[in-house]
Image (spheres, helix red, strand yellow):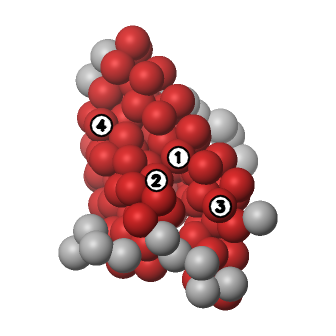
Amino acid sequence: MFDNELAILGLYGLLVALTILLQASGAFAQLGMGYLLSARDERRSLSGITGRIERAVNNSAIAMALFAPAVLILAAKDSFSASSLQAAQLFLIARLVYLPAYAFGITGLRTLAWLAGFGATVVLYLLGL
């Protein structure tokens, strides 16, 4: 399951989808169905763990926007290697740590996990050059 970069990309997509579901269920509990079905012209903020999950979703989408092209460049060039697999694995592990660390407000761990995931993404781009 963690044995190739494209599978890791797919797993990360599922992780982001799960995070979106968690955020949506928390938003439903805080804001109610009426607001969620409305045009949302009036901006309401989520608080607590749901607010942190919402911010984690936004960060995860940005991470996906950077990670996916790096993996796809390597795939297009048929340049997967042991190093690219390790970088992709590190990215996924870092993001698996990042999401609960953010949700539960563990700021030091969250920052380290973000840095590890971002660094792994940069390595993938460098390998794809």
**Cα distance in 3D space between marks 2 and 1:** 5 Å
Tell me if 58 is positioned left or right of 76 in this view.
Answer: left
Q: Secondary structure at mark 2?
A: helix
Q: Position of residue 41 (x, y in %)?
A: 71, 48
Mark 2 crowdedness (10 Å alpha carbons): few <14, some 14-19, many ≥20: many
Which of discs 3 and 1 lies nearer the camera? The answer is 3
Q: Amino acid at mark 3?
A: Leu
Q: Which residue is mark 3?
A: 127
Q: Position of residue 8 (x, y in %)?
A: 37, 69
Which residue is more in the foreground, 99 or 40?
99
Which of discs 4 and 1 lies nearer the camera? The answer is 1
Q: Which residue is mark 1?
A: 120
Quarter of the image with the C terminus in it? bottom right
Question: Quick check: marks 2 and 1 in contact, CB under 8 Å?
Answer: yes
Quadrant of the rendered image containing residue 65: bottom right
In the displayed structure, 96 sits above or below 12; it is above
Question: Quick check: marks 4 and 1 in contact, CB under 8 Å?
Answer: no
Q: Which residue is mark 4?
A: 97
Residue extending farthest to the top is 108
The tag earlier along the polypeptide, 3 or 1, is 1
In the displayed structure, 11 sits above or below 108; it is below
Residue at image x 52%, y 75%? 80
Q: Amino acid at mark 1?
A: Ala
